Image (cartoon, rainbow, N blue to C red):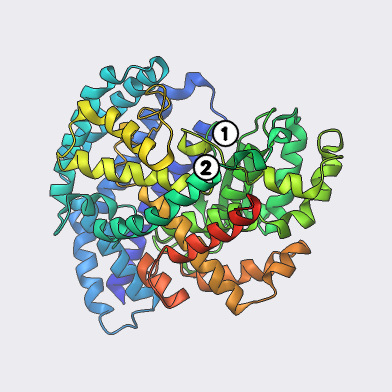
Amino acid sequence: MEKLEQLKTRLAEVMNLSYASAVLGWDQQVNMPPGGAAARAEQLATLSKLAHETFVADETGKLLDEAAIEVKDADYDSDEAALVRVVQHDYDLLTRVPTALVQEITRTTTLAHETWAKARAEDDYESFAPSLEKIYDLMRQKADALGYEDRMYDALLDQYEPGMKTADVQRLFDGLRKELVPLVAAIFERLDKVDESIMHLDYPEDRQAEFGLMVAKKLGYDMERGRLDKAVHPFTTSFSTNDVRITTRYYPDYLPASVFSTIHEAGHGLYEQGSAQVLEGSPLAGGTSLGVHESQSRMWENIVGRSRGFWRYFYPRLQALFSEQLGEVDFETFYRAINAVTHSLIRTESDEVTYNLHIMLRFEMENDLLEGKLAIKDAPDAWNAKMESYLGITPPDDTKGILQDVHWSSGLTGYFPTYSLGNFLAVQYWDKALQDVPSIPDDIERGEFGSLLSWLRDNIHVHGRKFWPAELTERVTGEPIQTKSFMRYLTDKFTDIYDL
Ligand code: CO
């Protein structure tokens, strides 16, 4: 397979350039002094230009065509067939959008980011509206260039969740909304059942860091192939399957931020560290989609990390570190506090129950804005009306409403639904893991996470990007993505916590 080998050599160069960019990006968020920003932007631009040019070159397309002939009889599941399949998909995505449009999007969103940050700080939507107008115009051009059959949004969504269609997301959300809105309303009637004030005491950062590191290691995050650092916005990034970095943040007066960010990012990190070693350095290493990635982080963060079993093991250890704050707080009070539902207007601060309603709102608005059913000037009112309808709360200003997220100013239209898809998949995968390995809950109570991690490794992580998200879910669970498992999980858990 001579052409396939040549293709691999070429792709390795692209991957090396991308990984080098990732190192610079990690350093930018973790270590870089503010003065380095301008030079760093230039360095990243150069590297990404080189990676892009190498990848979209005609030579890559030619090698792909030739390699496709060489692997045409290979097993669908083989690494060779998967490589050609996945790279062809990436190649199509990147070559369909004209370079001039890519540059225009980069230029516009770089400026829009500044405009958005100022508008958010000053609660001034009007100053951001022209940028948003321009971005949606560019998103329409991008969708046209990428191509779609049914909905314009399909083209944008496919960049983050290959194969997923807008109509499918719509159907999942419509089903969920019917049951979720009444559950949220019922819990909002009984918010006084849970007191989370113990979370807002004084928690020294060094001890939070000590606890977070202990948890990440215990879950199986490999420190020989990883690091945990501090960043303003927690994230995970990889430079190799054998060098996966995670970050977290510490609030001195709010304990859950660091604990659950660390577990969340460790969940992403475990997925990245778990790709088969034979895929190392190839485009098949890493996660298959943002939704599947988020299923891993959310499973560890919420299903495992906010469960009674997890804390049966960890709570005595947390109490030992924070004896002054938590020494007298009983287990149930703590368990309920980490699962408190709140009237949050902010997506990133919202709880497991309300989170997907925040996403649903964004998904619907993105579609309406893209298809011209909603005017940019009317968007804040539409946002507030949906908040009232889904959550029964109205933002007092646009800073806490439509201006809260960075995504739209960055040109990330089509990205939001993947957060919810991850939440749904997390429960489906978890249910299947328990079916296959019934000892998992007992193991977790004893601080043994190996049985769950092995199951995830064998069924999900090891495949890297070899299978599309829908294929993977079908292979793992025997059914497509659905919301009934998620809804049952939420209802059971929160009926207990809020005595519904
Ligand atoms: Co995440």
Residue at the image point whose x is 62% and y is 50% from the top: 226
Is residue 125 depicted above or below 215 in this figure?
above
State left or right for residue 152 relative to residue 382.
left
Give me the disc on residue 480.
none
Q: Residue furthest top?
A: 122
Residue at the image point whose x is 45% and y is 50% from the top: 182
Asked whether 498 or 104 is in front, the reply is 498
> Is there CB contact under 8 Å for labels 1 and 2?
yes
Q: Secondary structure at mark 2?
A: loop
Disc 2: residue Cβ within 8 A of ligand 1's nearest atom = no
Q: Is residue 313 visible?
A: yes
Three-letter amino acid code at the position of disc 1 = Ala
Give me the disc on residue 231.
1
Residue at the image point whose x is 69% and y is 28% from the top: 253
Q: CA distance from mark 1 to mark 2?
A: 8 Å
Asked whether 6 or 445 is in front, the reply is 445
On-image quarter of the N terminus: bottom left
Residue at the image point whose x is 34% and y is 26% from the top: 113
Determine the image quadrant of residue 465.
bottom left
State left or right for residue 104 relative to residue 6.
left
Determine the image quadrant of residue 359.
top left
Three-letter amino acid code at the position of disc 2 = Phe
Where does label 2 land, which residue?
Answer: 235
Q: Residues within 10 Å of mark 2 (few under 14, many from 20)?
A: many
Q: Is residue 275 visible?
A: no
Is residue 102 depicted above or below 73 in this figure?
above
Is residue 66 depicted above or below 222 in this figure?
below
Disc 1: residue Cβ within 8 A of ligand 1's nearest atom = no
Residue 443 spot, x, y in % from top left:
73, 68
State left or right for residue 42 relative to residue 304.
left
Determine the image quadrant of residue 464.
bottom left
